Image (cartoon, grey):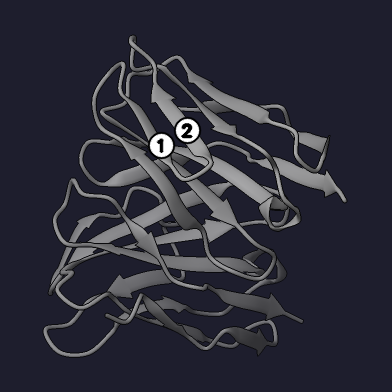
Amino acid sequence: GQQLNQSPQSMFIQEGEDVSMNCTSSSIFNTWLWYKQDPGEGPVLLIALYKAGELTSNGRLTAQFGITRKDSFLNISASIPSDVGIYFCAGLIYGNKLVFGAGTILRVKS
Amino acid sequence: NAGVMQNPRHLVRRRGQEARLRCSPMKGHSHVYWYRQLPEEGLKFMVYLQKENIIDESGMPKERFSAEFPKEGPSILRIQQVVRGDSAAYFCASSPTGGDTQYFGPGTRLTVL
């Protein structure tokens, strides 16, 4: 079945630093999504990418949909303490189901 | 516009009991999806429903699990004769159309004693 490989698994960063995480797959996806999940909550949509090569920003967040449609990255600029959480990439297949990566745990040193 | 609602937020059941998880999609959304998340893992797709129809249940265990989305009322995920391995967080998502972005509810955390 389809799998998404998300890296890094976890990271500590200094407040104010930029951070980058990525997701790769052996399968092609038509849509890539990035979600953030706080403890005890559901995933919250950060950015949705619909076209290969698309670069989209949402505040301090920037994400790109790889040209091969098999990868995506998410950048967070000037990290702040509230950026702590788990970030998931997800690929949408066959118009209905999402396939999720295992997540990147972000911890910020204040 | 209220988001996706799920209840209960926490549910404790003893082995052999039934668990019923409810999901009300966002207003205007007629597509509902259920996902399961084990600790420290990503979400895994279970089932995709539209009003009164199951579209894709390829992620549902073959036994004890069922889902419905009636014409009126919330979507229900039902787990019969729960076992300890069913302990997980169950998330519901909704979208306005089948190929559209999915928005998640806060989840129901099921604990089986």
Q: Position of residue B54 (x, y in %)?
A: 20, 62
Could you give the CA–CA distance between mark 2 and mark 1, rounded to whole angstroms? 4 Å
Q: Residues within 10 Å of mark 2 (few under 14, many from 20)?
A: some
Answer with the quarter of the image where residue B32 lies.
bottom left
Answer with the quarter of the image where residue B93 lies.
bottom left
Left or right of B35: which side holds B112? right
Whether tag 2 and tag 1 are in contact, CB under 8 A, the answer is: yes
Q: Chain of mark 2?
A: A
In the image, residue A73 above or below residue B113: above
In the image, residue B43 above or below residue B54: above
**Viewer-proximal residue among A109 and B74:** A109
The answer to whether residue A6 is seen in the rendering is no
**Viewer-proximal residue among A48 and A58:** A58
Q: Position of residue A84 (x, y in %)?
A: 72, 52
Q: Which residue is found at the position 73% from the left and 43% from the top? A: A105
Q: Which residue is mark 2?
A: A62
Q: Which residue is found at the position 53% from the left and 65% from the top? A: A42
Q: Residues within 10 Å of mark 1 (few under 14, many from 20)?
A: some
In the image, residue A18 above or below residue A66: below
Left or right of B38: which side holds A4? left
Q: Which residue is found at the position 22% from the left and 63% from the top? A: B49
Question: Exactly how many numbered labels are in the figure?
Answer: 2
Q: Position of residue B47 (x, y in %)?
A: 33, 58
